[in-house]
């Protein structure tokens, strides 16, 4: 090694030692004849002192050092003078008095300061990611990610799970999002797909009698991106044979206890609370509710369905819902503030947002004349309205009403300072619908994926093909503070049931054989009951670190357009490569 110690290693016990350090020049300060350098590496920072009395030539070299130069220094560890100790640094009690310095590499002036809490665009950070990663906060993020992965591996190993790598180049089996396709050179006109998840392979491993599988798996989905999504992401993936939901919950909760304690020192209480999907929608308007605060939604459809306000009456008569929320203490909101909220819910599809102030024990509004006194009192009582409160109501199609009011609830949670940011609330959401209706394609599709088993009580509904919206699945999501952190299910393990599910969602026998024939064939030879779950590592890391974007916990992430500013990927390829793959680029014609 070129060095004897790292820049975060030395302390007052090393005073008097001759050492060698390597790193980057973080800052340079001239104090008269003395030159001070903060030398930084991936482990920390050490103060280096150049004194012309020690060696004039070395001091001269020190004068020429600039930010981000890579240097090797040799010298003696000394105690910092009284009054100059930095208690915030692990090395803050010592300094290295240089006897020799070697410039290993010079550096251009970086486009932004290598320091935490800098004001720089995300585009610049991603373009110069190698510089961004030099910042101590980013170094800490990656080191904690490594630690979390090790904790998970140790946990699974202690419980007899076997880590198995599943293929990255696999068969295209569309399961919701678009596949990333990879053309095959040796099989012209044929394509591999990058896996959206290891779903089918881990089920095959259960058929193979492996019994307990896990993997820190790379997954790929070609979908529209948000701050919490990436085209490639990582998940803790696991599957077990001969289990029920209770076994999955127990293993998952144990994993969360291990990770939260080991990563950030938080002790979790288990078992985690559970709520059924229908109840989650009714109380919170979404299937991943943030339960750190109340402000729950209240349905008042029955109260307003016969009221004189035509908008409410018409919508509810056509199967719509009227959903309300009580914004405590918000009766003082101005017209402008209310208009802002109206525009807010419109972005989620709602056509409007009615509001009622609670004054002198009654509801007051521009539309209160359309309601009978007993209707207004019923609304106030059901929402537990008190003087000073403001009740907001959206009446619309059920999905729109729930979506918009769920988002309004979250907005008020932040504005009214109702959320304890230091708190971690876990919640299992269970009994999801097995299907959802796709109005655009005019057919039923899987709510999660087509390998999810049906709730035992609803098998008869499935076999009859009636009221498919009532059929529940054996699926479950783990939610933390309103973020879905994991999802899984008990799988289908019988060929006949799997074929029935395929038919129900419009996949013909021929298509099923072409896309999933290998799974159906495997089921012919005895598949055990099995189930599993996958947890998003990237999302977990944002919770541990308090980051707003998963890009801060991934070494080399992409933008919202799935573009890498550092490498300029994706990028064109030359004609020779295309010819080898039997591909031709079709240029879009300008209209």
Image (cartoon, grey):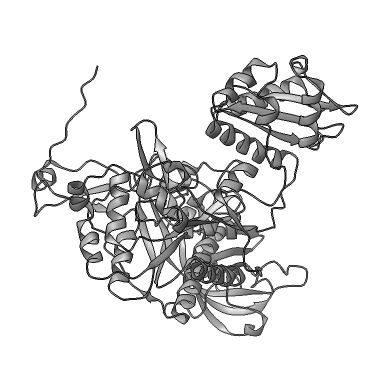
Q: Is residue 69 above or below residue 574?
A: below
- Which of the 4 image quadrants contains residue 427? bottom right
Q: Is residue 405 above or below residue 38?
A: above
Q: How many numbered circles are shown?
A: 0
Residue 67 shows in this picture: no
Provide residue 143's location: percent of width, then percent of height: 51, 67
Residue at horizontal 68 percent and vertical 17 percent from the top: 309
Left of 468 or right of it: where is 327? right
Q: Is residue 505 above or below residue 516?
A: above
Residue at horizontal 36 percent and vertical 42 percent from the top: 445
Left of 310 or right of it: where is 489? left
Left of 43 or right of it: where is 174? left
Left of 379 or right of it: where is 586? left
Residue at horizontal 49 percent and vertical 53 percent from the top: 132
Which quadrant is the N terminus positioned in? bottom left
Residue 80 shows in this picture: yes
Which residue, as the protein is rendered here, is positioned at the far right?
360
Q: Is residue 14 above or below residue 145?
A: below
Using the image as rendered, state which of residue 317 and residue 583 is in the foreground.
317
Provide residue 564's location: percent of width, then percent of height: 37, 46
Provide residue 556's location: percent of width, then percent of height: 41, 54
Provide residue 230's location: percent of width, then percent of height: 42, 48
Which quadrant is the C terminus positioned in? top left
Residue at horizontal 40 percent and vertical 73 percent from the top: 242
């Amino acid at each position: 090694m070129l060095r004897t110690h790292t820049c975060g290693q030395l302390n007052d016990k090393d005073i008097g030692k001759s050492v060698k350090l390597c790193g980057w020049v973080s800052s340079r300060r001239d104090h008269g004849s003395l030159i001070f350098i903060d030398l930084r590496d991936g482990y920390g920072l050490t103060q280096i002192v150049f004194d012309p009395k020690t060696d004039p030539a070395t001091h001269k070299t020190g004068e020429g050092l600039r930010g981000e130069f890579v240097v090797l220094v040799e010298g003696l560890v000394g105690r910092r003078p009284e009054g100059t100790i930095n208690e915030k640094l692990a090395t803050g009690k010592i300094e290295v008095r240089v006897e020799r310095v070697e410039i290993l590499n010079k550096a251009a002036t970086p486009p932004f300061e290598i320091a935490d809490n800098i004001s720089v665009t995300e585009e610049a950070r991603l373009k110069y990611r190698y510089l961004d990663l030099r910042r101590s906060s980013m170094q800490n993020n990656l080191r904690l990610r490594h630690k979390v992965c090790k904790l998970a591996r140790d946990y699974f190993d202690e419980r007899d799970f076997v880590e198995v790598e599943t293929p990255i180049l696999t068969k295209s089996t569309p399961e919701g999002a678009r596949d990333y396709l990879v053309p095959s050179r040796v099989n012209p006109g044929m394509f591999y797909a990058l896996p959206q998840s290891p779903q089918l392979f881990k089920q095959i491993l259960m058929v193979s009698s492996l019994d307990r599988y896990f993997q820190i798996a790379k997954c790929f989905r070609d979908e529209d991106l948000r701050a919490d999504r990436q085209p490639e992401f990582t998940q803790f993936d696991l599957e077990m044979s001969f289990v029920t939901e209770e076994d999955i919950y127990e293993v998952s909760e144990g994993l969360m206890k291990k990770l939260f304690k080991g990563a950030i020192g938080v002790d979790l209480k288990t078992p985690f609370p559970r709520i059924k999907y229908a109840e989650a929608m009714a109380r919170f308007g979404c299937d991943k509710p943030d339960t750190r605060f109340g402000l729950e939604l209240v349905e008042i459809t029955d109260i307003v369905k016969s009221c004189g306000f035509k908008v409410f009456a018409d919508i509810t008569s056509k199967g719509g819902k009227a959903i309300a929320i009580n914004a405590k203490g918000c009766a003082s909101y101005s017209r402008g503030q209310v208009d802002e909220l109206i525009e807010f819910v419109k972005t989620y599809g709602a056509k409007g947002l009615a509001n009622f102030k609670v004054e002198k024990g009654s509801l007051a509004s521009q539309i209160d004349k359309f309601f009978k006194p007993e209707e207004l009192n019923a609304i106030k009582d059901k929402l537990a309205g008190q003087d000073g409160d403001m009740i907001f109501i959206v009446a619309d199609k059920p999905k729109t009403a729930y979506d918009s009011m769920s988002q309004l609830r979250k907005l008020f949670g932040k504005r009214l300072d109702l959320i304890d940011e230091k708190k971690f609330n876990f919640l299992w959401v269970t009994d999801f619908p097995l299907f959802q209706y796709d109005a655009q394609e005019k057919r039923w599709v899987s709510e999660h994926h087509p390998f999810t088993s049906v709730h035992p009580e609803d098998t008869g509904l499935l076999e009859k093909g009636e009221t498919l919206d009532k059929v529940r699945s054996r699926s479950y999501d783990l939610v933390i503070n309103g973020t879905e952190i994991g999802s899984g299910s008990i799988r289908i393990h019988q060929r006949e049931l799997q074929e029935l599910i395929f038919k129900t969602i419009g996949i013909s026998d021929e298509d099923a054989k072409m896309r999933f024939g290998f799974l159906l064939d495997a089921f012919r030879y005895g598949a055990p009951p099995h189930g599993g779950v996958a947890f998003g590592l990237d999302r977990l890391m944002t919770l541990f670190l308090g980051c707003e974007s998963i890009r801060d916990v991934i070494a080399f992430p992409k933008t919202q357009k799935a573009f890498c500013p550092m490498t300029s990927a994706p990028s064109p390829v030359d004609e020779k490569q295309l010819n080898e793959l039997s591909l031709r680029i079709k240029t879009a014609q300008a209209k």
